[in-house]
Image (spheres, coloured by chain):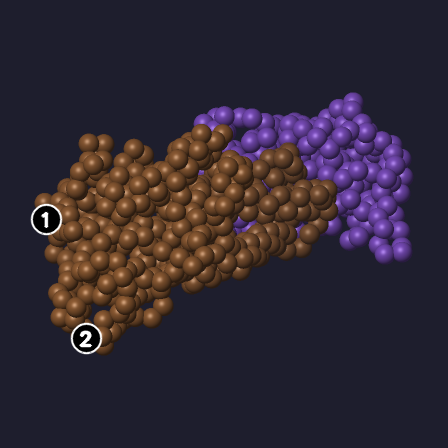
């Protein structure tokens, strides 16, 4: 009787039932879409941070460059100290130089690793490989030779550079390569620590026509490509990665690193870890993922604000409106059936049986609305994913493994110094999670229960005689 | 069956108090057929509602089978109605979305009768009133007389102790009215029902064993007529 009565009654007021269900569906669909968009923005922000930090990194430690440490590197060409090379002298240099970042002792990595709440550390050395070749022009500079960055009016001096980062092979899950995926060959192994092997960024490999097994020069030494890595899109990715010990040796920076990657024991320990590192290394710059996240600007940041603020409130407002509408229409439908319920009471139906009937009708509408809302939510999320333009995220990241070339002002081939601005372009996703679907179903049931409660109360508050006296 | 003592019922209509019943005393024995006649608005339906525990009196006692309905809680009254009382209304009051069979079954739902047994009893009740072939029809697909017969079947399917009818022929034409009253009369005599019929129609009232006259909330019962032979 319960199901039959429910089915027939909903069929009788099909239009109203559909209207209520659609209202609920709209509210629930909007909530799911906004939740999915928020989740997508969060995931995208994590991707951005990972591309800058590497997966698993909670804190980075770096050292501001020492005062007066700007200016380009100098290359000694011919002659001794204090003597000038003759014009017309040919030269060819390939050197590995610092990226204009301050350095820390390798022992600092051990110091940080020993701190409480630190689960792992890895050091890295960001460098630039600068190749300079050509002929000394007439009226060459004093001192050791031309500075990188000097023009000298010579068109016969050629220069190129690419970024190289020395990675700590002992902690492969942490560091600049952690957010990358090996697409060809292999990653480093412990046995590679003193070998002339490299893992090359996929974009750089493509531009230089490098494959697994190819060789290229780093600081004048022949390095073999053992793997190609695809790193999350970020201008902070290096062109090539080599073992840290080789990088330190070739750059003449033994026992030096310029970034320490730190993983905390848990997310809640990050502030404490940050404080401990600052205490242990007072001159270092300690940056947490939260610091970096707060510096992210660009359309991704705007999307995050939009989803979290306007989007959420809009979804809540529409949902509340849908609940109110469902309740009002249910109460209205119940009002038109007061005499019917009076008759049932006269037949001996208890109030709770009548309320159960009304709530069953309201819940059935709520479930239909919920199902439609979930479908709408999936559709909305898919639309967001399909139609969202690529988003940009820009951060001023000091201490990041930047693609910085030879520093210093002026010159035809100098560019950004230690404090790099990194812009990442990412595509927004909008994943619909099981939690969101479960929440939607719960909301639909809640909507049905609220509407049914109002209607039920309305139905049973009258005495049978008063209900029977109602004119419909 | 019933013993009413000093029953009054007052309603508030704005600032005015309407005295619908004024000190009604009444005794209805088992198997009696009482017709309550009177002009509109003089308290006939209100009295029927008291007898049917559909409303509570302002004062007085209403004994039904030895129990005072006026003192019972709502839940208890619902149980009494479910088990012992059948109702027939002027406007039939069938559930529009349920078929004739399902309308009759609705009276058995509160008694916890199993679905199969419910269907059986409802089918038999409809057959008894001559509507066995219309069991699947919705009320909108039945004539007024047929709808009232479904209502009679619904009232009787639970084998009540008393049948309370409020203007059962009020919405029917003359021919159908006689048909319905003939059915009620035969049920009263065959089943030994206690029957209380509220009507303004003298031809309906004349069929009853006793006639009560309701005027300005007061009831005067005339001497009982002789029982009709079955």
Relative to A21, say whether A349 is above or below.
Answer: above
Chain coloured purple: B
Task: State the image coordinates of residue B210 (x, y, percent, origin top left).
Answer: 77, 37
The lab-note entry on whether marks 2 and 1 share a chain reads: yes
- How busy is the neighbourhood of tag 1: few (under 14 within 10 Å), some, or many (20 plus)? some
- The kind of secondary structure element at disc 1 is loop
Report whether A455 appears left or right of A6: right
- How busy is the neighbourhood of tag 2: few (under 14 within 10 Å), some, or many (20 plus)? few
Q: Quadrant of the C terminus of chain A?
A: bottom right
Report whether A107 appears left or right of A223: right
Residues under numbered marks 2 and 1 in contact, where contact means CB atoms less than 8 Å apart: no
Residue A214 is tagged as 1
Task: State the image coordinates of residue A158 (x, y, percent, origin top left).
Answer: 17, 67
Report whether B52 appears left or right of A24: right
Q: Residue at x 22, y 35 (%)?
A: A193
Task: State the image coordinates of residue B16 (x, y, percent, origin top left).
Answer: 89, 55
Check disc 2 and report the residue beneath it.
A138
State whether residue A144 appears in this view: yes
Picture colour for chain A: brown
Report whether B210 appears left or right of A15: right
Q: Nearer the viewer, residue A419 or A38?
A: A419
Q: Residue at x 28, y 43 (%)?
A: A248
Q: Nearer the viewer, residue A156 or A88?
A: A88
Task: Locate residue A100: give its quadrant.
Answer: bottom left
């Amino acid at each position: 009787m319960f199901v039959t009565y429910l089915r027939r009654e909903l069929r009788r007021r099909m239009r109203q039932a559909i209207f209520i269900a659609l209202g609920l569906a709209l509210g629930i669909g909007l909530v799911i879409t906004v939740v999915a968009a928020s989740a997508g923005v969060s995931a995208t922000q994590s991707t951005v941070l990972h591309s800058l930090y590497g997966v698993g990194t909670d804190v980075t430690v770096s050292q501001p460059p020492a005062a007066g440490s700007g200016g380009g590197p100098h290359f000694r060409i011919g002659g001794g100290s204090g003597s000038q090379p003759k014009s017309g002298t040919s030269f060819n240099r390939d050197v590995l130089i610092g990226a204009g970042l301050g350095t820390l002792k390798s022992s600092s990595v051990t110091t940080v690793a020993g701190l409480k709440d630190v689960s792992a550390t890895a050091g890295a050395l960001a460098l630039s490989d600068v190749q300079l070749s050509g002929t000394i022009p007439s009226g060459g500079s004093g001192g050791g030779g031309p500075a990188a960055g000097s023009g000298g009016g010579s068109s016969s001096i050629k220069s190129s550079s690419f970024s190289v980062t020395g990675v700590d092979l002992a902690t492969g899950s942490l560091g600049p390569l952690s957010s990358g995926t090996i697409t060809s060959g292999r990653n480093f192994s412990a046995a590679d620590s003193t070998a002339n092997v490299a893992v090359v960024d996929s974009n750089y490999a493509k531009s230089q026509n490098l494959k697994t097994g190819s060789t290229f020069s780093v600081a004048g030494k022949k390095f073999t490509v053992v793997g190609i890595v695809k790193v999350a899109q970020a201008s902070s990715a290096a062109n090539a990665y080599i073992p840290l010990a080789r990088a330190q040796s070739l750059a003449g920076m033994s026992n030096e690193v310029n970034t320490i990657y730190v993983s905390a024991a848990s997310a809640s320990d990050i502030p404490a870890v940050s404080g401990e590192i600052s205490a242990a290394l007072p001159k270092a710059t300690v940056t947490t993922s939260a610091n970096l996240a707060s510096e992210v600007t660009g359309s991704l940041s705007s999307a995050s604000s939009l989803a979290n603020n306007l989007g959420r409130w809009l979804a809540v407002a529409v949902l509340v409106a849908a609940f109110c509408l469902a309740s009002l229409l249910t109460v209205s439908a119940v009002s038109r059936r007061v005499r019917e319920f009076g008759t049932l009471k006269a037949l001996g139906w208890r109030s709770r049986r009548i309320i159960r009937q009304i709530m069953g009708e309201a819940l059935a509408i709520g479930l239909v609305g919920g199902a439609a809302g979930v479908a709408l939510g999936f559709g909305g999320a898919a639309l967001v994913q399909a139609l969202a333009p690529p988003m940009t995220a820009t951060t001023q990241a000091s201490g990041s493994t930047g693609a910085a070339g030879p520093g210093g002002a002026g010159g035809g081939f100098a560019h950004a110094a230690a404090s790099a601005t990194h812009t990442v372009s990412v595509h927004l996703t909008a994943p619909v999670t099981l939690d969101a679907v479960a929440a939607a179903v719960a909301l639909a049931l809640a909507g049905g229960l609220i509407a049914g409660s109002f209607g039920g109360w309305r139905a049973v508050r009258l005495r049978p005689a008063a209900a029977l006296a109602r004119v419909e | 069956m019933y013993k009413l003592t000093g029953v009054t019922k007052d309603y508030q209509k704005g600032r005015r108090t309407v005295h619908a019943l004024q000190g009604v005393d009444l005794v209805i024995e088992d198997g009696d057929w009482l017709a309550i006649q009177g002009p509109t608005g003089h308290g006939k339906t209100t009295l029927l509602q008291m007898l049917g525990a559909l409303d509570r009196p302002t004062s007085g006692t209403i004994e039904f089978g030895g129990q005072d309905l006026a003192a019972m809680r709502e839940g208890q009254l619902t149980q009494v109605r479910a088990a012992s009382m059948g109702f027939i209304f002027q406007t039939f009051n069938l559930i529009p979305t349920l078929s004739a069979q399902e309308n009759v079954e609705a009276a058995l739902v509160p008694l916890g009768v199993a679905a199969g047994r419910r269907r059986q009893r409802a089918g038999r009740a409809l057959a008894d009133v001559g509507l066995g072939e219309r069991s699947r029809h919705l009320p909108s697909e039945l004539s007024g007389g047929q709808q009232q017969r479904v209502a009679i079947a619904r009232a009787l399917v639970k084998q009540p102790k008393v049948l309370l009818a409020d203007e059962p022929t009020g919405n029917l034409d003359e021919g159908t009215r006689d048909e319905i009253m003939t059915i009620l009369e035969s049920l009263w005599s065959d089943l030994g029902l206690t029957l209380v019929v509220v009507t303004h129609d003298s031809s309906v009232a004349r069929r009853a064993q006793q006639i009560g006259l309701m005027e300005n909330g007061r009831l005067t019962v005339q001497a009982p007529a002789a029982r009709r032979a079955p």
